[in-house]
Image (tube, rainbow, N blue to C red):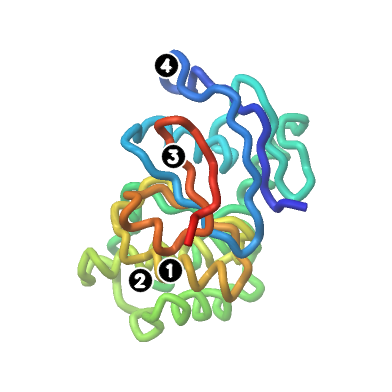
Amino acid sequence: MSLLRCKNITCRSTANTFRQGLIEGFSASFESGEITGFCGSDTEVKELLLSILGLIERPDSGSVVLLDQEVSEMSEPLSTKLRDTSFGYLFTHPHLLPSFTVAENVAMPFFRICGQDGVQESTLAALEFVGIPELNAVPVGELHDSVHWRVAFARAIVHAPPVLIAVSPPNPLLLPLARRLADERGTTVLWNGNKTDVLPFSDHVVEMTSLTYYAKGP
């Protein structure tokens, strides 16, 4: 059974604006340990679809099933709790607090979702995974922008979510980390990016021009 799947997703509107005919009848399944790349020039459609799959937006119609739970049948508090525990996110910006240390930035979602127990161990494990454990006590504002993305990646995975969604990160250098995450931890990864960057690391690709979903060929 797929960890995350959707059926007949249609969405013409979002919480902030109205758009006509953005997504029509999209269906797909996403397995543990696989990366699906979302490619194509229609950035708004890609980000909207990933926001729906990541339980940030609700579609006009269709179903999203996560861990065998039908999200559309849930109340808002329950779906929010499921989203917090099940997803890690990367967005257009790292959204870090420059006066906080690397460890403090990474630990925040774990502390909010999981509580205090195990926060230090999980934070160090996330920093080791992205290759910067020695920077744990350094304020983020003292680091180069390229390191900020590693911190953001560590923060996204610190609570061990089964799904990582890269909605719109501009840094393709994180893709090898995403591949390791899928291979070593069985994480399902949905990654929005340029096809040239995404294809070598993906098991499947969604082409947003036609909303087709296919397995990557040899």
Describe residue 158's horizontal placement relative to residue 85 as left or right: left
Q: Are marks 2 and 1 in contact (CB under 8 Å)?
A: yes
Estimate the spatial distance between the alpha carbons at disc 4 and disc 1, rounded to whole Å: 39 Å
Relative image position of residue 183 (x, y in whole percent): 57, 72
Question: Crowding near pointer 3: few (<14 within 10 Å), some, many (20+)?
Answer: some
Tell me the tag on residue 104.
Answer: 1
Residue occupied by mark 2: 101
Is any atom of residue 76 visible in this view? no
Q: Position of residue 84 (x, y in %)?
A: 61, 50
Q: Amino acid at mark 1?
A: Glu
- Left or right of 138? Residue 218 is right
Residue assigned mark 4 = 19
For image coordinates 50% across by 74% down, the residue present is: 126
Q: Nearer the viewer, mark 4 or mark 1?
A: 4
Mark toward the start of the polypeptide (3 vs 2): 2
Image-based side of 98 in relation to 178, left or right: left
Residue 70: % across, % down: 76, 37
Q: Between marks 2 and 1, how big is the CA–CA gap?
A: 5 Å
Of the residues shown, which amino acid type is indicated by label 3?
Glu
Identify the residue under disc 3.
Answer: 207
Q: What is the distance, in whole Å, between disc 1 and disc 3 at their CAs?
A: 37 Å
Total marks in image:
4
Q: Of the residues shown, which amino acid type is indicated by label 4?
A: Arg
Instruction: Classify mark 2: residues with Cα within 10 Å, few (<14), some (14-19) or many (20+).
Output: some
- Viewer-nearest of discs 4 and 3: 3
Residue 193, how many percent across, how many down?
A: 36, 49
